[in-house]
Amino acid sequence: MTGIKARNSKHSLISALLFLLLFFANSSVLAAQKEAGKTLLVRGEVFSQRADAKVPLKRRSLIYEKDEIHVGKEGRAQFRMVDQALISLQENSVLQIQKYQYIKGRGGNSALLELLSGGLRTITGAIGKGNKKAYELRTPLATIGVRGTDYEVEIVSNGMYVAVWDGVIHVRARKRNGCNILLGRSKPFMFIFIDRLGRCKGLQQVPEVFKTGHSSNITPGIQKRRGGTFVAGRSLQARGSAVNPLIQLVQNGVPPLQKPGSLQPDPPTVTPPVTPPVTPPVTPPVTPPVTPPVTPPVTPPVTPPVTPPVTPPVTPPVTPPVTPPVTPPVTPPVTPPVTPPVTPPVTPPVSTNHKAFAVDQSQPSKELNVKASVLNSSVPVFRVGLNLLESFPAGSATSDFQQSVGGYPVSWGYWGAFTSRFAAKNVTNSTGTGLIWATYEATDPSIVSARSGTFSRYNNIIDSLTSSSAGSLKNLQVQMDVNFDSGNITNGALSANTSDETWVAVFDGKINAGDMDLQLNGASVINSDANTAGPARDANGFIAGDFVGNNAEAVLGAFGLSEDNNPSNHVEGVFIVEEEK
């Protein structure tokens, strides 16, 4: 028995030792994993190759040093790094996080990334804004150092494109005797192409390969043809013509000035009140009094007296003249004039049969079910339930009015103030905030229903009219995949930036009888400034859209988002996004 107990004790000791070894080994592995960032957005297949494990990534998943991130076909991912840098990966991309160390207030912070394939856009954080030598991106053809900037890289079959939207980057080819160049707004070039021999070619035009963001200040060499790509940056079209890069955004509810060269608002049409004709009073004719003729007195003939004997003369009685009675004139009664009742002017009923979107800046996260009275006018009347919304004062507060936006039957504009003709609970008179609106003709639902195909991506922003509580809104990006065969809308994503925050929203939808029905699934906002950044904050709101164009080749959309715990912080607008060619 003693031997058996001894063997059992020895076996238990060995098991305990093995457990402790495994525990400390796992602890060492966990301790060795240094958090590099957090996932903000995932579309399609996105995973991290971590050691020997394939870890699928989803929103809010952490990423670590030594991770190799893969984005599959038709995929997309965005990450917020620990130093508050933003990284956006395009489809068919592989990014290795070789090193990412950041502790606020300490030295020795550094980042080393390696893009093996695909495309990347990044806005550098605290590491890139501090020690310039502490940040480096490597690619098969070149290495890139930054000086606090926003730049983009796309690897293609015969080389690599590089673009700088803000700041300066240092590009050095990996081939011996290859190019060594600084790129930026203050430099000779903002765009280059590097071939496989390390030779650089400066480009005056925005490279067509970029489909996620360009700057509104870049005007030389814009190609004027349809089917262009609005770069998520700021309002320049790389391959299109329908964008006005000078569009002035609405700031803090104050209507902006009219843009140079834009259409002036139509003068409001004033309908004079209809006053019924007033019939003058009828006065009957006054008959003058009738005075009968006056008959003079009749004097009988005087017979001379006959003097009979002893008979005294007889004097006949004198008959006084007979005056007929005088009938006083008869004055007919005077009837006072009859004044007909005055009917107040009749306001004809307003017909509101046209499709429209509208976002009230006082409650931007609320979707309004709205119809318009007229198209192609700067002063339409909108019906929201029982309310009739009108520009206030009529037409004077209209700005940013555009017709045929992007070549589509769409008009939009901004009212600095508006009023409601009828009292209601859901929309009230507004003089402190404004209304962003759009009127349009939708694609015939039968044409939408007749379209076929399992995949059509809409990601080419043509134009937009936006505002935010923090000032101008820029870098608007919208994407959605439409399956016309099943009627499903998937992979919907919207992102935009204010001066110090990034907003992200995800959505999906359905096509019902040729009409688009979108549903917001989630939204968040995060500070862009590394010094004030914190965790992402939840937001709520809506997104809506409808097909426009002869063959449903574009979507007119509207959105409004506000922060859950701070509703006064909000973004909103309307946009047109075209189908990818």
Image (tube, rainbow, N blue to C red):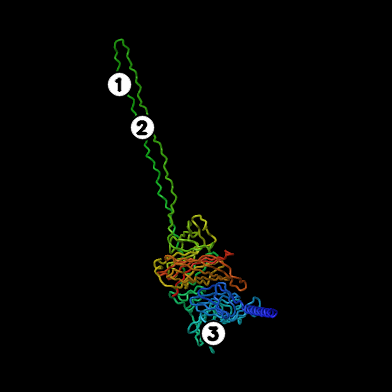
* Residue 305 locus on image (x, y percent): 30, 16
- Residue 327 lies, with reference to residue 534, above or below; the image says above
Name the residue type under label 2.
Thr
Horizontal side of 187 relative to 318 (left or right) equals right
The answer to whether any part of residue 402 appears in the image is no
Q: Counting residues from the N terminus, which is met first, the one under dot 3 or under dot 1?
A: 3
Residue most extreme to the top: 310
The residue located at (57%, 72%) in the rendering is 60
Name the residue type under label 3.
Ala
Name the residue type under label 1.
Pro
* Residue 570 locus on image (x, y percent): 55, 66
Of circles 3 and 1, the one toward us is 3
In this figure, which residue is indicated by the disc labeled 3?
142
Gap between marks 1 and 2, in whole Å?
A: 30 Å
Q: Secondary structure at mark 2?
A: loop
Q: Secondary structure at mark 1?
A: loop
In this figure, which residue is indicated by the disc labeled 2?
291
Q: Are marks 3 and 1 in contact (CB under 8 Å)?
A: no
Instruction: Categorize mark 3 by other alpha carbons within 10 Å: few (<14), some (14-19), many (20+).
Output: many
Q: Quadrant of the C terminus?
A: bottom left
Q: Counting residues from the N terminus, which is met first, the one under dot 2 or under dot 3?
A: 3
Horizontal side of 14 relative to 362 (left or right) equals right
Instruction: Categorize mark 2 by other alpha carbons within 10 Å: few (<14), some (14-19), many (20+).
Output: few
Q: Are marks 2 and 3 in contact (CB under 8 Å)?
A: no
Residue most extreme to the bottom: 176
* Residue 110 locus on image (x, y percent): 61, 80
Q: Are marks 1 and 2 in contact (CB under 8 Å)?
A: no
Q: Who is closer to the viewer here, 84 or 333?
A: 84
Q: Secondary structure at mark 3?
A: strand
In this figure, which residue is indicated by the disc labeled 1?
301
- Residue 329 lies, with reference to residue 251, above or below; the image says above
